[in-house]
Amino acid sequence: MDSLTRSERVLHGSLYCMTFVTGLVDAGSWVAMGHVFTANMIIALTALAMGMRNGTVRRLAVPELTTTVLTLTVAALAFDFSLTPGNNPRWRRRVGSVFMMLSGAFVGVQLLKHSLALLLGASAVLTALCALAQIYREETEHEAKLRTSRR
């Protein structure tokens, strides 16, 4: 198993959370907004939020942990599948990403049974928490670099 630093665990946790949020938003857009995914609709606020998330995820560049491209993740998982250990070292990330997307979609449909506002509110809160986690992560990394450079 990967030996991740605390910073990497926070990063990966945030990305999994954002993948979950993608499932929430996609479920809401599919069920409540005419059977299309948000990425295919011209809804300014949602499109802006999805674009910002995609840009952030691309900037963070964690291999095999995409938050919105489920098809690519599943295809990569299938392509690299092997019964021989060691040929697909990041399969856990891919499976985790698919699991979080599908879990988010399931929870999104359940929230949608109550109200669209609840689904969107949960998405906003989770996104804000992920953003705060990343701010905290970057500040602690910066502080650690300062301590190291002072020695």
Image (spheres, helix red, strand yellow):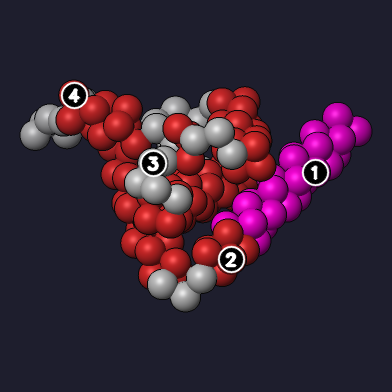
Horizontally, residue 18 falls left or right of residue 69, namely: right
Q: What's the amino acid at mark 1?
A: Glu
Q: What's the amino acid at mark 4?
A: Phe
Instruction: Residue 31: say if magenta.
Output: no
Q: CA distance from mark 4 to mark 3?
A: 28 Å
| Residue under label 4 | 79
- Secondary structure of residue under mark 1: helix
Q: Nearer the viewer, mark 2 or mark 4?
A: 2
- Secondary structure of residue under mark 3: loop
| Residue under label 1 | 139
Q: Quadrant of the N terminus?
A: top left
**Contact (CB < 8 A) between labels 1 and 3?**
no
Q: CA distance from mark 1 to mark 4?
A: 38 Å
> From which residue to which does the magenta span run?
123-151
Horizontally, residue 75 falls left or right of residue 102, namely: left
Instruction: Residue 148: say if magenta.
Output: yes
| Residue under label 3 | 36
Q: CA distance from mark 1 to mark 3?
A: 39 Å
Decide which of tag 1 and tag 3 comes sooner along the chain: 3
**Contact (CB < 8 A) between labels 4 and 3?**
no
At 44% from the left and 67% from the top, the residue drawn is 112
Q: Which mark is residue 117?
A: 2
